[in-house]
Amino acid sequence: MSVLSNRVAIITGASSGIGEATARAMAHSNCKVVLAARRVDRLQKLTDEIIEAGGRALPVQCDVADRAQVERMVERCLETFGQLDILINNAGVMPLAPMAKCRMDDWEHQIDINIKGLLYCTGYALPVMLKQKTGHIVNISSVAGRVIFPGAAVYCGTKHAVHAISDGLRSELADQAKDDGNQIRVTIVAPGVVTTELADSIRDDETREGTQKYYSTMPGPLTSEDIAAAIQYALEAPSHVDVSEILIRPTAQVR
């Protein structure tokens, strides 16, 4: 039996890509999953598939940039399943464009989803985990959290922030564990090129076409299932083991 059996996980951005693949993998391991995203029709379809396969899932329409919606998502998780063991902050956008184009709406959108959304979800889930003295937060970052790419300065900035926030939280919890014995872990999973819908969030036509071309010519890009397997590896580690970071690239990705 998987160590994830009967645990409860919230997965944001669960309507496609990494979030969807992770939800399927965790439900297969008998984890109860709360599926959060804005596209409720896709969430319902995934929920039906999981339940039909014998799993348990709760779809919750949630825009992580809206604090009230995030708070309600955590409340619904607790009302339905009575606990919250795992938070996977997967929701993210990547509207790339050169800085010189000054696409300020895109800048704000990335900050709202990639940074503030992650903070809101963490802010409502963490008190539950602290009370339980156990939990695991997995933050999906990117190789862009380690490497700066031209045309991606703001996106890279948001992912650098994910790394800083994650490691800061991890170190605070580790220090606190010496006093209260909590076993709350924090993991960063930072993928390289993955075949998901993320590039569709690029609203600058020239940049979107260039990015899609790069993705399409990458030999052997990662799949969502590859990242789901990495997440599950970290989650299934023994409780005294904190897999702090997984940086995962396609073999053919240079940077």
Image (cartoon, helix red, strand yellow):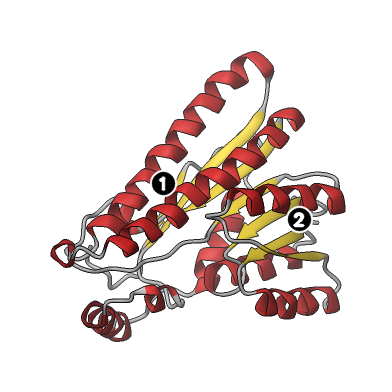
Q: Amino acid at mark 1?
A: Val
Above/below status of 212 relative to 72: below
Q: Picture coordinates of residue 205 (x, y %)?
A: 26, 82
- Helix, strand or loop at disc 2? loop
Q: Earlier in the sequence, mark 1 or mark 2?
A: 2
Q: Are marks 1 and 2 in contact (CB under 8 Å)?
A: no
Q: CA distance from mark 1 to mark 2?
A: 29 Å
Q: Amino acid at mark 2?
A: Ser
- Quick check: 253 above or below 126? below
In this rendering, the count of numbered labels is 2
Disc 1 secondary structure class: helix
Q: Give the x, y percent position of residue 59.
A: 74, 67
**Which mark is in front, 1 or 2?**
1
Q: Which mark is residue 249?
A: none
Q: Which residue is mark 1?
A: 162
Q: Is residue 245 left or right of residue 7?
A: left
Residue at image point 68% right, 70% down: 24
Residue at the extreme top of the image, as rendered: 179
**Does residue 13 appear left or right of residue 205 in this picture?**
right
Residue 175 higher or lower than 236, as above or below:
above
Residue 23, position as x, y percentages in the image: 67, 66
Examine the image and state in which quarter residue 176 appears: top right
Question: Counting other residues with Cα less than 10 Å from the Cα at mark 2, is it few (<14), some (14-19), or many (20 or more)?
Answer: few
**In percent of the image, x 48 and y 41: which residue is there?**
244
- Give coordinates of residue 53: x percent, y percent: 82, 77
Q: Is residue 127 left or right of residue 132?
A: left
Q: Specify the quadrant that holds the N terminus.
A: bottom right
Q: Residue at x 68, y 21 (%)?
A: 181
The disc at residue 2 is: 2
